Amino acid sequence: MTLTIAPRVRALVLLLLAAACALLAGAGPASAHAAVTGSDPGQGAVVDKAPARISLTFSEQVAMSDDSLRVLDPEGKRVDTGKPSNVSGTTYAVPLHSGLPDGTYTVAYQVVSADSHPVAGAYTFSIGAPSKTSVSVSGQSADDGVVGWLYGFGRYVSYAGFIVMAGGAAFVLACWRRGSGVRPVQRFVVSGWVALTAATLALLLLRGSFTGTGKVADVFDLSLLGQVLQTKTGAALVSRLLLLAAAALFIAVLFGAYARPSPTTTLTDGASRRQPDPREDAQEKRDLTFGLSIGGVVVASGLAASWAMSEHASVGLQAGIAMPVDVLHLLAVAAWLGGLGALLVALYRAPADTPVDRPAVRRFSQIAFGSVLTLIATGTYQSWRQLGSWSAFTDTRYGQLLLAKIGLVVVMVGVAWISRRWTGRLAETAPVEAVAIREKERVGAGAEPAGDMATTDAGDGDAPATGDSDTGTGTDTDTDTDEHPGSERAAQLARQQAARDAARQKRVRDADPNRFGLRRSVLAEAGIAVVLLAVTTVLTQTEPGRTEQEAKAASSSSASASSDTGASGALTLNMPFDTGGEDGKGIVTIDLDPARVGDNEMHVFVERPNGRAFDIPEVKVEFTLKAKDIGPLPVVPDHIATGHWSANGVQIPMAGDWQVDVTVRTSDIDEVTVSKNAQIG
């Protein structure tokens, strides 16, 4: 018997090792969640003549399709020609028609970042002067619409399927091998495999439309599917499907090896007795468990890596460390939450003659405790990597979701501690007591079935008993008619007795208050786990806090540099000041529009460091062009509203590098002048 099982286990292990090696071979580091850090023309810019092309600069290299960059005129018609191209580094451009008329134009973009997430947005610029436009750029998001919702739901189902399949199988293998023969537990694990397989196929079909048009009709477009298969995400999904084939083999071996019925021998009295099984050899069981353990770890790690290689872990800071940490994190989640689900099924649905025992619950408690420690360690590293600063916890959506996840984990650990206490009190006497009651009643009522059978035989007999005794002979026909009804009656009574025994065992088992308490606490844990999984799924689709803050800083820096050099459009200068007196700190902002030679409109805004507008006694502005010895040209703006001053007809006589001096007075004696240079004209 050993020779029949060992080759199957070795073949399974080799298959899983080969699949995992193939999956992990191509994962390499990249950058982080993409964001636009610059554009030419810039957002809101007003240019004198039509540009020959539009260019966008991202925080990382992105994947583009033919329609990733679109430029629309005021009536909504496309004015771009050709396909987007990579100009240099992370800058991409698309050519425009020549001789475009004046008006406001809309630039819409939709690209895919290196971590597989679509990034979409839009902005406007004007030629000559701003105009009305029929193009709406608000609310454009790659996650909107039916396809976006379906894709998000598919991700949730895929995570849930992996957790149920991997965690349930681990629970059976490591904690409760008797559960391999329990149908509800088998259905639980198999349902996880089915859910993950179906979700992976759905994601593969939805991917092209999700990162492109967002139309439901494009879901079954084979050309889009071909493009998806050439991407990193497509390769990860295909690899996941291959590993799921290996997982199916693993599950079949797991349930087939431990749940195989034992040989029995039917005795002359109709009873069945269990015979020794050579497969129960201790060494063979150790070999089988070792092989399945290795195979299970390999296939589960490979499946977890299919997420790590295509999402946040594969890009950004320390990708070479982050990917294995992410795999370990997913495995710990599966061992805890998936095992918890299997335990819940065992507590509620396991047959009365195969209840989950205290040793199994204790072993799972130890595994869950180790999983929590692993989650704390890997989660701390992931939080540092994705956030980068304490302020990102509250200032970014990723940080806010992470705080919610941490809170749910803390609550779940508290409930798990209660479950651990119930585990310590869990009585082992219920199964033993049930068997004792059954044996006692069977012995006490042992004559009853015989009496019934005797009565039945007597009533149905074909020949008198005395005749048989006297003659000592009988025909075969007489024997058949005597024994057949009795055999049927005995089988019927055996089934009735088995049903009564099972019901009695269930009542005894369920009467244990400790088992009832454990059920309730595990059910509460499972409910929190469902919500936790939903938050985690949303978290994986959210831009990390670190890259969100870096993108904001880069965008602000780019906008400041663009305005300071007079690249195009209105000029905005932000200058902090400190007069040294009470309420003497703040920020003064100068807006000059259109920042060209001739008449300009100027607005001055004064704000506290927290961004709240406030009034000061006086503010003055002077313009000086030192290269041409022009100025200073004083401008005294009029007070319009709280923290807002304005001046029209500000004359800029010639283009050049102008020094802008702003004098701020916050009291009768507290005054300061701040300066900044800017290219005007």
Image: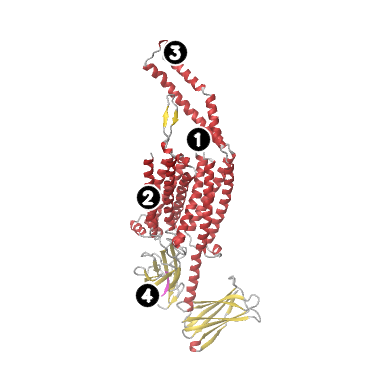
The residue pinned by badge 1 equals: 353
Of the residues under marks 4 and 3, which one precedes in the sequence? 4
Residue 284 x %, y %: 42, 41
User: Which secondary structure lies at badge 4?
Assistant: loop
Q: Which residue position holds label 4?
A: 52
According to the image, label 3 marks what residue? Answer: 465
Q: CA distance from mark 3 to mark 2?
A: 69 Å
Q: Kindly identify which residue carries mark 2.
A: 14
Return the disc, 2 or 1, that comes first in the chain's sequence.
2
First in sequence: mark 1 vs mark 4:
4
| Between 650 and 200, the one nearer to me in the picture | 200
Q: Residues within 10 Å of mark 3 (few under 14, many from 20)?
A: few
Q: How many marks?
A: 4
Q: Considering only order in the chain, which callout, 3 or 1, is on the residue closer to the N terminus?
A: 1
Relative image position of residue 152 (x, y in whole percent)? 45, 55
Question: Which quadrant of the figure has residue 73?
Answer: bottom left
For the N terminus, the image quarter is top left
Q: Residue at horizontal 51%, vertical 31%?
A: 501
Decide which of 566, 548 is in the foreground and name it.
548
Q: CA distance from mark 1 to mark 4?
A: 80 Å
Callout 2 touching callout 4 (CB < 8 Å): no
- Tell which residue pokes out farthest to the bottom in this image: 629
Residue count near mark 4 (Cα–Cα under 10 Å), binned few <14, some 14–19, many ≥20 = few
Q: Residues within 10 Å of mark 2 (few under 14, many from 20)?
A: some
State the SS at label 1. loop
| Kind of residue indicated by mark 4 | Ala
